[in-house]
Image (cartoon, rainbow, N blue to C red):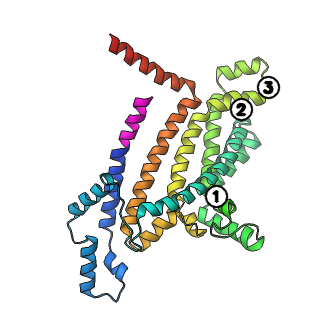
Amino acid sequence: MGRYIIKRLLWMIPIALGVAILVFTLMTFTPGDPAQTLLGATATEEDLNAKREELGLNDPYFVRLFDYLGDVFIRFDLGNSWITSVSIIDTIKIRMPRTVILTVVTLIIAFGLGIPLGVLAATHQNKWQDSVSMVLAMIGVAIPNFWLALLLVVAFSVKLRWLPAMGIEMGLISYILPALSNCTGALANCARQTRSSMLDVIRADYITTARSKGVPERSVIYKHALKNALIPIITAAGTAFGRLLGGAMIIETIFDIPGMGTYIIGSLNNRDYPVVQGGTIFLAIVFSILMLLVDLLYAAVDPRIKAQYASSKKRKKVKANA
């Protein structure tokens, strides 16, 4: 297990390197002049040239690329914002927890509703419960998040005045509407994945044996079937967490949440390229770590996977002794 973890951590290096090269290249060849954006339309040509020299924009592409990769992967420095001159890492430390809170609340709602919905559909296959559950799941996939966010703001903030329309001043309550707006796709995918996985499991022989022994149906479904159907659901949860973590930009912008989404979008609009590059690399590393944690959860949920790690370790010991 330890060797597997080390191997996965080493794989994160080329992944982060590839993301860094890709994002840097895209930012470099994006049309527009960052110096013009920073100084404004009234800047003279001399001022613009001086600003380009200060930012290193006059250097050749490969010189700038290798300098940037050296700063990120050797000195572990994402640089400073061109707009505010504030350290990008320090800003990420402040903004990242807000995005994580939004993502966690979204996942709790999505999987707290999606798993029971999927179990209901699987245990009532081809009945009205199954049809209603899957129709709701399809509606969840089809609804645009930004449109739902605006409807929820009008209903619960403007009309009923139950929840705040924007900001995070009221604590966790402020994350309810953004999470509800952002959870529809994850909820629908969770329900469909749970239904598919449960249908495969409840046809297994050990489920038939448990029922023949008189085990209560609730225990058969939730203690036996659902437990063994969790691996695809865990995969869906890990993928959804990473997707929501990096894709909450529109929701954060609508609800004015000062998280990573608004940070990157605002920087992109202002051509603050170091922030876009640093934020994207950071999110890529977080997503890679998250996928590693998902793989480790497999062993905790399914003893067969843990046994595979143990057996492979024993085989290596036998070969070494031989």
If the image is split into quadrants, where does the N terminus sit? Answer: top left
The correct choice, above or below, for 28 with respect to 6 in the image is below
Dividing the picture into quadrants, the one containing residue 90 is bottom left
**Crowding near the residue tagged with mark 3, few <14, some 14–19, many ≥20 C-alpha atoms within 10 Å:** few
Residue depicted at 66% across the width and 58% down the height: 180
Inspect the image, locate mark 3, and give the three-letter code of the amino acid beneath it. Pro
Q: Nearer the viewer, residue 93 or 114?
A: 93
If the image is split into quadrants, where does the C terminus sit? Answer: top left
* Residue 143: percent from left, percent from top: 62, 60
* Residue 82: percent from left, percent from top: 37, 72
The disc label shown at residue 216, or none: 3
As drawn, is 96 to the left or to the right of 6? right
Q: Is residue 3 magenta?
A: yes
Dividing the picture into quadrants, the one containing residue 271 is bottom left
Give the spatial CA distance, label 2 vs label 3.
Answer: 10 Å
Secondary structure state at the residue bearing disc 1: helix
Dividing the picture into quadrants, the one containing residue 174 is bottom right
Which residue is label 2 attached to?
222
Q: Earlier in the sequence, mark 1 or mark 3?
A: 1
The disc label shown at residue 179, or none: 1
Q: Which residues are magenta?
A: 1-11
Q: Earlier in the sequence, mark 2 or mark 3?
A: 3
Q: Nearer the viewer, residue 31 or 139?
A: 31
Give the spatial CA distance, label 1 vs label 3.
Answer: 36 Å
